[in-house]
Image (tube, grey):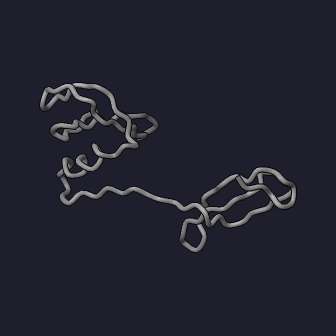
Amino acid sequence: MHFCELCNQYLSIRNELVDDKHKLFLYCKNTECNFKIECKEKRLTYKTYRQNKVNDKSFLNKYKINDITLPQKSSKCPKCKKTNKNRFERKYFNNQYYINNICSCCYHNWT
């Protein structure tokens, strides 16, 4: 935990874009203080999944099925007709939420 040197309040963390790079800063929420320092103890990580073919979604799903950050639920796959604990992800598109399911056997995805 970090505290402000001026007002002793708890410092919050924020991501900012500086010189086309993302950096983390610790800042004081007190509006009178405006204390801010760069955070060097923590770092940002991003996960990106790439497809090797344009229409090959099974390649992408093989990586997503092993992603432990995605939740699981028991559901029946429409392609292989097996009931397994499949991964799913929520997507927000056109002001609506969609749930994209991924089969753990055949890597088929459906909404």
Answer left or right for 86 relative to 43.
left
Q: Where residue 67 sits: x, y (%)? A: 34, 46
Q: Where residue 33 sits: x, y (%)? A: 85, 58
Answer left or right for 83 relative to 38.
left
Q: Is residue 28 above or below residue 61?
A: below
Identify the residue at horizontal 54%, vertical 70% (top origin). Answer: 21
Q: Where residue 2 sits: x, y (%)? A: 73, 56
Answer left or right for 25 relative to 7.
left
Q: Of residues 55 and 43, which is closer to you in this image?
A: 43
Q: Is residue 90 above or below residue 10?
A: above
Q: Where residue 78 sits: x, y (%)? A: 17, 28
The residue at the far front in this view is: 1
Instruction: Classify residue 42 by image quadrant.
Output: bottom right
Answer left or right for 107 relative to 25.
left
Q: Is residue 42 above or below residue 18?
A: above
Identify the residue at horizontal 61%, vertical 62% (top origin). Answer: 24
The residue at the far bottom in this view is: 19
Identify the residue at horizontal 19%, vertical 47% (top origin). Answer: 58
The residue at the far left in this view is: 80
Count of marks placed on residues = 0
Identify the residue at horizontal 46%, vertical 37% (top origin). Answer: 95
Q: Is residue 96 above or below residue 63?
A: above
Of the 4 image quadrants, the one containing the C terminus is top left
